[in-house]
Amino acid sequence: MPLLPYSSMLSNAFLWTTYGLLKREPKIWSCNVIGVFLGAYYCVNFVKNLPKHKNASVFDVSTPTLPGSVRQHFQGVMAVIFGILLLAFAKPFANTTNLIGNIGVIICMVMFASPLSVIKVVLETKSAKSIPLPFTLISCLNCFMWSMFGWFEMKDINVYLPNLMGLMSGLVQVALKIIFGDNDNLPAYTATDIAP
């Protein structure tokens, strides 16, 4: 399973909490502050359950499905948090809130597409076992509701655009689950097996 959905969830929730606070919109920040705590909890549990490597720090662990090492994910999350805090409190721009919203759109799209980082594994093995179905279904429901709320109630492109993209990403993941299922009986294909 990849770490990317959880590290991007933490970054994303922190960013949207800040965005909601700057806009004085409790409907945004109150939901996302919960996501900050859940994202941190998921990241910690992911790291705690990584296989132990002899003479290696857990921060240096890297697997094909992470992508990257735990240290790189940690550094990325911290860069987002410090960058957003710098923007929010330094306020060098007149339109800081919209800038944070635009950054949020990009990070949100990464978060919703991150489970697709295992698509190569799914296509090679003809098994979607590596796609976390509960996470995907909740993401679809969440994205649908935020898309509707952002479009009709708030009329805020920073809210509805990334959630529409997240809904599409989630539906692709559900389609992969339906097409391939969690087949354990199929042999794993190597790169040479699928090369032209």
Image: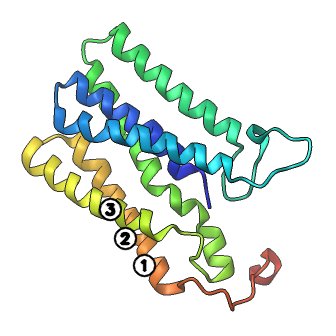
User: Residue farthest to the right?
Assistant: 55
- Sequence-first disc among 3 and 1: 3
Quadrant housing the C terminus: bottom right
Q: Which mark is residue 171?
A: 2
**Residue 93 visible in this rendered orientation of the protein:** yes
Q: Residue drawn at (32%, 49%), measured in percent from left and top?
A: 162
**Residue 8: x %, y % from top left:** 49, 44
Q: Secondary structure at mark 3?
A: helix
Q: Amino acid at mark 2?
A: Leu
Q: Secondary structure at mark 2?
A: helix
Q: Secondary structure at mark 1?
A: helix
Q: Amino acid at mark 3?
A: Leu
- Could you tell me if the residues under marks 1 and 2 are in contact, i.e. CB atoms within 8 Å? yes
Image position of 39 (left or right of 26): right
Separation of marks 3 and 1 at Cα, in angstroms? 12 Å
User: Residue farthest to the left?
Assistant: 153
Image position of 129 (left or right of 38): right
Q: Which mark is residue 175?
A: 1
Determine crowd level at label 3: few under 14, some 14-19, many 20+ residues with C-alpha closer than 10 A.
many
Q: Amino acid at mark 1?
A: Ala
> 168 or 79: which is nearer to us?
79
**Residue 175: x %, y % from top left:** 42, 78
Q: Which mark is residue 59?
A: none
Image position of 15 (left or right of 145): right
Q: Residue drawn at (66%, 53%), measured in percent from left and top?
A: 66
For residue 102, which quarter of the picture? top left
The residue that disc 3 covers is 167
Separation of marks 3 and 2 at Cα, in angstroms? 6 Å
- Could you tell me if the residues under marks 3 and 2 are in contact, i.e. CB atoms within 8 Å? yes
